[in-house]
Image (cartoon, rainbow, N blue to C red):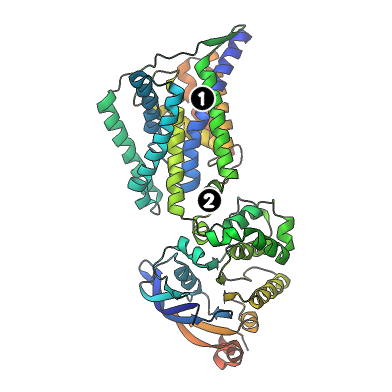
Amino acid sequence: MNPGFLLAYLIDGLLIGFVYGIAAMGLTLIWGVMNVINLAHGPIIALGMFGVYLLYTGAHINPYLALLIVAAVGLGGGFMIYWIAIHRVINAPHLSTLLATFAVNMIIIGLGTAAFSTSPYTMDFSLGSLTLGVVTIQGTRIVAALAAILVTGGLYLFLYRTATGKYVRAVANNRAAAELMGIPSARILALSFGLGTLLAMVSGGLIATFFPFTILSGGAYELKSFVIGVLGGLGNPLGALAGGLILGLFEGIIPAFVPNTWVPVFEFLLFVLILLVRPTGLFGAKR
Amino acid sequence: MALLEIRDVHAGYGEVQILWGVTMKLEPGKLTCLVGANGVGKTTLLRTVVGLLRPSSGTIQFDGQDVSRLPAYTKADLGLVLVPEGRQLFTDMTVMENLEMGATVGRARKEIKANLERVFEMFPRLKERQHQRAGTMSGGEQQMLAVARGLMAAPKLLMIDELSLGLSPVLTLQLFETIRKLKQTGLTILLVEQNVQMALAVSDYGYVLAHGKTALEGSSRELVHNTHVREAYLGL
């Protein structure tokens, strides 16, 4: 194998890994704060893809500007999902919240299929590419990676430097104690779900700028988010980013040696191995 | 007028009723203790007063206001603060962050600087460890942090559930001394304690809870000499 090609594969994988990272952050934030496994994560990612696509092809809004709109919609939509579907079962056993988010999953997929069918969409958008020797990198991927770094930094600063962010961590850590301190925990949970949804939609929007997609595309990223959650530890944004990078590199490297279809096999092998060896995640999170 | 008045409160968890009519009055500026055997409902009573549980009947008045059915998160703002059993710290957060979380309500936020100085003076250990994660400290230090976090909320009434549970005798003495000093500053305190002897020694007034009801009350001096209390709780 030509080392140049290998390098190209690795860089591609690494760049996409940043985007996987923020998708996973959305899933792990919701799990870490409220102990809810969000089975609507995939379809919400797909909604982010369609959001950016529609704003770009329909209204000719720059995709990165469209991403801001999609983020705002994601935050608001997340609030709504929380208050309508999840709040009433938040104290019930896990199965109830699983079913609630699964119902949301089915609703989004149903409506999305009716509106967009399940055929693939492609955004006719390019930022050109950067060529260094044998390595050619699409501009959209570089921008996506930069956006992911910004989002991660932003989330980290929010959680560790702002009062509201600290409330989120306090509620994640001990909800009853947070209530005793005067923190309205239900509102914090709604905010966390909104943020998780925002992250999912932003990652979807970024992916749409360089991959074709359907309303069902989110499912694959949801599964990757679970793998990354285990890699990076649940409820830790930097861990999720690191996990995303590892998975991205993995995906870059595997097709260099075996056919592409083997990628999920190796991914889930990695998933099971980590669960066996370090069930709390590679970067030692709390659960 | 009493700062906290609990009238004939019934409460429990789902089908299991634990409190069968508790009546108590806490006078402002006094240290009141609540004692009773394990499982008699002391913690349940505190959880009900603070709003983590709803009473099925009865009323709870705090500072002249009926607070029986207010949600837990509104209580800290009123000045009704609980240091819960088992500390319930934010173990993944630093000591400093725990103290900040204590002062989230409007009133307390204004006094955060002065209160921080006060609790650091009271517990110099916490000042040394302010950047350490709360969960990595010893049991005694964690209990100090739990009390300090409660004080950061600028309470009118501080309720402490099992101050001495799991602590060494030396630390227990030290914490009781702190509580005594707090009382001298005029703070109203409700102390739930398994160490009945210590509790009665430091408090002004006491209640004995039995079978989910207030069984006995009186000044702590009277209770120390009460035959039933001596036999049942002091082992004398």
Q: Residue at x 44, y 78 (%)?
A: B6
Check the picture and name the quadrant holding the C terminus of chain B: bottom right
- Comparing B179 with B216, the one in front is B179
Most extreme residue toward the front, as rendered? B110
Mark 1 is surrounded, within 10 Å at the Cα level, by few (under 14), some (14 to 19) or many (20 or more) other residues, namely some
Most extreme residue toward the left, as rendered? A114
Assess whether mark 2 and mark 1 are in contact (beta carbons under 8 angstroms): no
Counting every numbered tag in the picture gives 2
- Comparing B230 with B178, the one in front is B178
Q: Residue at x 54, y 17 (%)?
A: A12
Q: Horizontal and vertical percent for residue B157?
A: 55, 72
The reply to whether residue B192 is visible in this rendering is no
Q: Which residue is mark 2?
A: A167
Q: Is residue B180 left or right of residue A77?
A: right
Disc 1 or 2, which lies upstream in sequence?
2
Q: Chain of mark 1?
A: A
Q: Which mark is residue A266?
A: 1
Q: Horizontal and vertical percent for residue A26?
A: 47, 37
Q: Residue at x 34, y 36 (%)?
A: A105
Badge 1 and badge 2 in a common chain:
yes
Q: Amino acid at mark 1?
A: Phe
Q: Horizontal and vertical percent for residue A24?
A: 49, 34
Distance from the alpha carbon under mark 1 to that under mark 2? 38 Å
**Helix, strand or loop under label 1:** helix
The reply to whether residue B126 is visible in this rendering is yes
Q: Is residue A199 above or below residue B23?
A: above
Q: Chain of mark 2?
A: A
Q: Amino acid at mark 2?
A: Tyr
